[in-house]
């Protein structure tokens, strides 16, 4: 944690960061590990997320509020997805010759995951919060700091866009 604190000048921002670190670190690791399914990569994603949080600590209000939670979840998910994409690019290049003609075991799941990654960040965030982490529309609304109606509409639009992407892949 000392590395992150050295990036922050104001004592009140340091205190805020310490509270965020203690409150959300394990949740952030859990989210990253669910996306990456690898503890070392999850630790890397959480580290990158904390760097981003430290850089933007002055933009964060209260450490224990739904907006802060939504912001932190978004950062760790985006950092995890970035790392996932980076790792998969290297795997595809390395395994391309070996995998010629071999069908994917979980082709449907891989296609759906790929489609989720192609969604705009806001839609991806809603889909992951609702269907991957199991939050209700009301909870998602609170996390994102929007009304229940707006969260419901965002959920509907995200599902429609995901369906379009999945159909485009020729799998539905």
Image: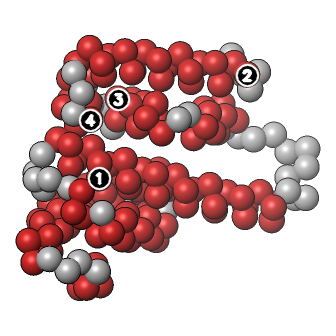
- Of the numbered discs 3 and 4, the one sitting upstream in the chain is 3
Instruction: Please give left or right for residue 73 compared with residue 83 in the image.
Output: left
Q: Do the residues labelled 1 and 3 touch (CB within 8 Å)?
A: no
Around disc 3, counting alpha carbons within 10 Å, would you say few (fewer than 14), some (14 to 19), or many (20 or more)?
some
Q: Residue at x 74, y 26 (%)?
A: 169
Front: mark 1 or 2:
1
Q: Do the residues labelled 1 and 2 touch (CB within 8 Å)?
A: no
Residue 10, percent from left and from top: 14, 77
Residue 17, percent from left and from top: 18, 68
Residue toward you, 144 or 170: 144
Residue of label 3: 130
Q: Do the residues labelled 2 and 4 touch (CB within 8 Å)?
A: no
Front: mark 1 or 3:
1
Q: Residue at x 20, y 43 (%)?
A: 67
Quarter that holds the N terminus: bottom left
| Label 1 SS | helix
The circle drawn on residue 168 is 2
Instruction: Please give left or right for residue 169 compared with residue 6 in the image.
Output: right
């Amino acid at each position: 944690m000392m590395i992150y604190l050295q990036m922050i000048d104001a004592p009140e921002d340091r205190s805020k960061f310490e509270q965020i670190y203690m409150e959300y670190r394990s949740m952030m690791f859990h989210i990253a590990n669910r996306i990456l399914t690898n503890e070392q990569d999850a630790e890397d994603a959480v580290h990158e997320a904390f760097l981003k949080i430290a850089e933007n600590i002055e933009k964060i209000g209260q450490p224990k509020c739904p907006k802060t939670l939504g912001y932190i979840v978004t950062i760790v998910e985006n950092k995890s997805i970035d790392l996932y994409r980076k790792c998969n690019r290297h795997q595809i290049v390395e395994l391309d010759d070996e995998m010629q003609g071999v069908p994917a075991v979980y082709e449907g799941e891989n296609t759906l995951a790929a489609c989720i990654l192609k969604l705009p960040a806001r839609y991806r965030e809603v889909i992951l919060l609702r269907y991957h982490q199991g939050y209700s529309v009301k909870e998602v609304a609170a996390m994102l700091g929007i009304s229940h109606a707006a969260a419901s509409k965002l959920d509907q639009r995200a599902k429609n866009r995901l369906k379009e992407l999945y159909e485009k892949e020729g799998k539905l």
